Image: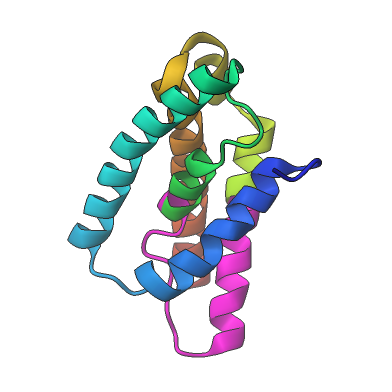
Amino acid sequence: MAPKAPGTFGTIAALPFWWFLLQGMPTLPYLGILIAGFALGVVICELTSRDLGVHDHGGIVWDEWIGVWITLLWLPHSGDLLTDMAWLLYGFVLFRFFDILKPWPIKWLDAKVHGGFGIMIDDVIAGLFGWLVLQASLLVIG
């Protein structure tokens, strides 16, 4: 319920959960959590937006959680806290960049797809864009 930048604050709130619960988790359980989280999010976001009478109210941030967790899939875990935090910050910035900028098809989906699925899908695509850039960066940097 941050009065300014609720999506950014919602994304920040997702990071400690990722750090302690998902970081270094094997891929299949991680993907299972993402899929279950997406499905749950569709329902939660639908009900919440209906109750509030506002599509994608700023207080709805579960979509940011799933989106940033997508970006952070396969984030390197070196054991060096400073390096790991730098990659985490980079992933966070990438996700927020795509979530705020909303390049095609994110902006189109945000405008055309409504309900809980609409609230979730634009952040999922922003998360995928962030993931692609992060993984490409890892390949380049090595």
Residue 114's place in the image compared with 103, above or below, is: above
> Residue 72: horizontal and vertical position, in percent?
45, 59
* Residue 38 within the magenta-colored segment of the rendering: no
Q: From this viewpoint, which residue is outermost toward the left? A: 28
Q: From this viewpoint, which residue is outermost toward the bottom? A: 80
Q: Can the viewer see residue 105?
A: no
Q: Is residue 124 left or right of residue 87?
A: left
Residue 85's place in the image compared with 109, above or below, is: below
Q: Quadrant of the N terminus?
A: top right
Q: In the figure, residue 104 lies in which quadrant?
A: top right
The residues colored magenta run 70-94
Q: Is residue 52 left or right of residue 3?
A: left
Residue 3's place in the image compared with 30, above or below, is: above
Q: From this viewpoint, which residue is outermost toward the right? A: 4
> Residue 39: horizontal and vertical position, in percent?
29, 35
Q: Viewer-proximal residue, 44 or 84?
A: 44
Q: In the figure, residue 18 lies in which quadrant?
A: bottom left
Q: Is residue 134 left or right of residue 41?
A: right
Residue 30's place in the image compared with 96, above or below, is: below
Q: Can the viewer see residue 139?
A: yes
Q: Residue at x 68, y 52 (%)?
A: 9
Q: Viewer-proximal residue, 37 or 137?
A: 37
Picture mark count: 0
Dominant secondary structure, magenta: helix
* Residue 92 within the magenta-colored segment of the rendering: yes
Q: Residue at x 34, y 74 (%)?
A: 24
Q: Residue at x 21, y 60 (%)?
A: 29
> Residue 134: horizontal and vertical position, in percent?
50, 57
